[in-house]
Image (tube, helix red, strand yellow):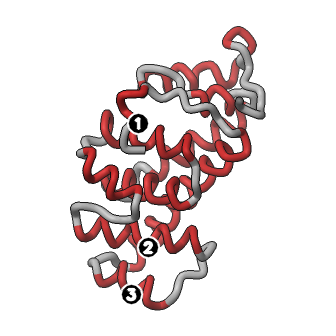
Amino acid sequence: MSRLTAPAPEDVPAGARSILDGVRKHFGFAPDMFNMLAANPAVLEIVMSLQGSVGRLLDAKTRHTIALAVSRANDCDYCQALHTYTSSKLGGMASDDIELALTGSSTDPRRAAVARFVQRVVETRGQVGNADLAAVRGAGYNDAEVLAIVTTAVVSLLTNYLNNVNRTVIDIPADTTESA
């Protein structure tokens, strides 16, 4: 059972209604995470703004790989389920690549390096070693891209923390969460 109260649909604050409508249009439903965030429209707006901004940093499959790897490293079952869904249904990732991303790898060598790197970022709370940084650079990422990778990982951490605090009940369609 979730620990924070999501407003009933008729009680969603006006500032959150249009955001939830956009979420419903994007996903085909409003995942409980967003319904819970609607209790504080400013928080919902911040999360949506960050997610929208991160969407400009890296290609979609790399962003999905980061979200999956971070969610697993941070033990966020809800985010693993949601990112499995979005990676598959909206991001065009194959189920084997989703499963690899959850374990810190990928079918693509560059994305595999990113997945390992962001898991190290989570495990070390950002105190990665020189070898970790050298590995992601060795996969062809420059310093500007490393900044984008870390930023994307931190946005995933934010939603991981919100969902872990809430213990958000997984409401993602069951046929899409088999890899999670």
Specify which label sits upstream in the sequence, 2 or 1.
Answer: 2
Q: Is residue 157 left or right of residue 93?
A: right
Task: Name the residue beneath numbered marker 1.
Answer: 177
Name the residue at 74% across, 20% down. Answer: 7
Task: Name the residue beneath numbered marker 2.
Answer: 117
Task: Name the residue beneath numbered marker 3.
Answer: 134
Q: Nearer the viewer, residue 43 or 160?
A: 160
Quadrant hosting residue 116: bottom left
Name the residue at 36% across, 32% down. Answer: 176
Mark 1 crowd level (few <14, some 14–19, many ≥20, 10 Å Cα): some
x and y percent of residue 58 in the render?
Answer: 36, 58
- Residue sticking out furthest to the front: 178
- Residue sticking out furthest to the top: 10
Specify which label sits upstream in the sequence, 3 or 2.
Answer: 2
Residue type marked 1 = Thr
What's the CA distance linking mark 2 and mark 1?
A: 24 Å
Q: Is residue 178 left or right of residue 94?
A: right
